[in-house]
Amino acid sequence: MHIVALPGRDRQTEAWMRDLIDALAQPDATVRALHYRHWDTGAAPSFDAEAATIAGLEPDLAVAKSMGTLVSVAAFGAHAFRPKRAVFIGTPFNHFGAYAATMRDFCRAVPTLFIQQTADVTTRFDELTRALGDIDGATFAEVPGSDHVYSDVQALARLVRDWLGVRSR
C-alpha cells in the first residue's frame, strides 16, 4: 500500500501524523509524508505550493489532517493528485472558500472518510455532514471533542482500519 500523509498547519502535527501512520501501516506500506515549507521558513502556508509537491501521485490512500485536507483538495483540482481513497481528519470546511466546490468534486471521485469532532472549532461535525453528506463517496465518523487536536491516535486508527476493511496488526 502506498500512503501519502498530509499533516496539519502546525509543526507538531508532523509527529502526530507519523504516529497515526505507524498505527495504520501494513508491513508492505510505503509512506510519503509531507514536510511543509512554512515550518522551516516562518512564511505563511501556501496550499498551492504544497499541492504541487504531490502532483500526479496516485497513492492507495491519502491521510490528511486539517490544512492537509486543503492541500489534498488543491492538488486534486490543479495537479492531478488522484488517491484511490482518502481519510480527512479535522476538515476545516468552513475555511475552504474557493476550494469548497473542488472538495465536492474530490468526494465524488475519491471515496473519503471524514473523521470530525462533534464541536471541532474549525467545522462542527453536523456542519460538515450538512455540507457534504449528500455525496455518495463521503463517509462520516463523529468523535467527541472541540479542540481540533484528535489526540486519540489508536481510536482514529481503528476507525480508519474498519473503513478500509483492514485487520489490526
Image (tube, rainbow, N blue to C red):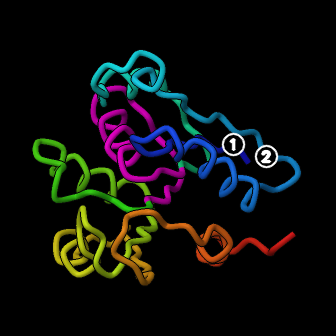
The quarter of the displayed image where residue 26 is located: bottom right
Please give the name of the residue rendered at 36% of the width and 44% of the height, measured from the top-left corner. Answer: 67
What type is the residue that disc 2 sits on? Ala
> Which of these two is toward me, 151 or 7?
151
Q: Is residue 57 left or right of residue 91?
A: right
> Which residue is depicted at the point 61% across and 36% down?
33
Q: Position of residue 84 (x, y in %)?
A: 54, 50
Q: Earlier in the sequence, mark 2 or mark 1?
A: 1
Question: Which stretch appears magenta?
Answer: 63-88
Where residue 108 appears, as percent x and y from the top left, is: 31, 59
Please state which amino acid type lies under the numbered disc 1: His
| Mark 2–mark 1 distance (CA, rounded to whole Å) | 6 Å
Residue 81 on the magenta segment: yes
Instruction: Tell me the element at label 1.
Output: strand
Is 134 left, or right, of 155 in this rendering? left
The location of residue 158, given as percent across then percent down, is 66, 76
Residue at the outermost left position: 97
Instruction: Give the class, few, some or many, for how many residues have Cα within 10 Å of label 1's Cα (few <14, many ≥20).
Output: some
Identify residue for label 2.
Answer: 29
